[in-house]
Amino acid sequence: MNPANGGWLILLSLGLAMVLAVLHTPESWPQWLGWLRPAWLALVVFFWVMELPHRLGLISAWVIGLGADVLQADPLGLNGILLAGITYIAWRFYERLRMYSVIQQCGVVFLLVLGSELMRALVQDVAWGRGWSWGVLAPALMSMLIWPLVYLVLQRYRLQFRIE
Amino acid sequence: MLTGLALVSAVLISLEFTTRLLEPVRSVIGTVVSPLRYAAHSPYFLGSELGEMMATRHMLQERNDLLEQRVLELSQTALVVSNLKRENEQLRDLLGSQARLPDAGLIAELVAVVPTVNTHQIIIDKGVNAAVEVGQAVIDSEGLFGQIVEVEQAQARVLLVTDISHAVPVQINRNGVRSIAAGTGRLDRLELESVPTSADIVQGDLLETSGLGGRFPQGYPVGVVDSVVVEPTASYAQVSVRPAALLDRSRHVLVVTEGRQ
């Protein structure tokens, strides 16, 4: 990732996504709200790779994943490979994805996040015996629902600061 | 490229689960990303600061009265305890057994909660710089809270007793029956593992750490037995325990730093 020409701004948005990913609700709020957290980091990475495939590569996505591993107390390398997977798919099909309507993009986001959550659940199940639950659907659904908003905001951000 | 990264990830993940080689790496990355954690926690921090600033004289007075009363109560208990301790030491002397080292504690404040839903972990504000080590027990004012699982420069990660991957050797304070209290993934419940149906455990029994296994110091309350269900056909009794520590409320915890056997 090149720090010039808005590289810092891309990093900033990724940092913000990480903050959103660890933000917790006040203790007095019901605990199930925690299930409604979209996969912020995956959404932001997906956006940047789709819009600017030459700026964010597999390795940088993987390195960002290392930070997410430590923040979310996942085994090292897990988020890295999940993000790299999303990056690969976004990079492979970015021309087609850009042509999609927002609704179609939502579907793609749903499948990508669902896939990565399933992988995460698999690793956690093998490692800690955490078991399976329908909970893996929640981040995928929430990410799908919030995607139009994320897309709008980041698109405005990108055009405003002319990140290319 | 992708397969390469997948391989690296797979190696890292399996290393992480089988060895402790990656702990320093985690600790370095953690130190780098810890500002993000602070940023996520800052609204609460600001809120509590503001709350303290806005507190009225009356409220402070009330709190002060409450605290004074508590100090009085506690110092009375402390008097009794010091008497008992001396007596206990004399008895131990008579028996010729080793005196127990007193436990030293380090007060730490909760700075973040690990956001993953199916795990119970928190971040505290003491790390390598305060000589916190992996494996140390963490308690709060009511009982055993958890243990340190990762140490960074100025922060450490604590696995709570209720996490599904956590278990602690316990004994019943009434009769010394030993067991293992495992987390269930629910904040208000632990379960005793492999309790024979004939074991003398009843509702209301207090569980404390047994000190077996050498990881947790002996004698800290873990929880109170909530219910004992004995199915006639099952080989083990189902014993559910309510944790003693205020897992979702405590802001300050104590890291037990010395006195481990």
Image (spheres, coloured by chain):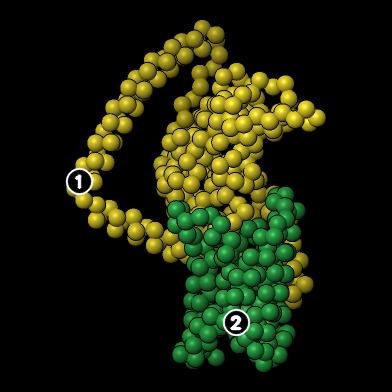
Chain colours: A green, B yellow
Q: Nearer the viewer, mark 1 or mark 2?
A: 1
Q: Is residue A35 above or below residue B219?
A: below
- Relative placement, left or right, of A147 versus A97 is left
Secondary structure beneath disc 2?
helix
Q: Amino acid at mark 2?
A: Phe
Q: Residue furthest front?
A: B232
Residue A60, given in percent of the width and then of the height, sits at 62, 75
Residue A144, given in percent of the width and then of the height, sits at 62, 75
Name the residue that disc number 1 marks: B58
- Relative placement, left or right, of B65 versus B5 is left
Q: How many marks?
A: 2
Image quadrant assignment for residue A61: bottom right
Subunit that carries the residue with mark 2: A
Quadrant into which the N terminus of chain B falls:
bottom right
Residue at horizontal 45%, vertical 63%? B40
Q: Is residue B229 above or below residue B251?
A: above
Q: Is residue A24 visible?
A: yes
Residue at horizontal 37%, vertical 18%? B80
Residue nearest the observer in this picture, A30 or B71: A30
Marks 1/2 same chain: no
Q: Is residue A7 visible?
A: no
Q: Amino acid at mark 1?
A: His
- Relative placement, left or right, of B127 versus B116 is left
- Relative placement, left or right, of A136 versus A34 is right
Subunit that carries the residue with mark 1: B
Residue at horizontal 39%, vertical 58%? B44
Q: Which mark is residue B26?
A: none
Image quadrant assignment for residue B86: top left
Q: Is residue B218 above or below residue B186?
A: above
Q: CA distance from mark 1 to mark 2?
A: 53 Å
Name the residue that disc number 2 marks: A47
Quadrant into which the C terminus of chain B falls:
top right
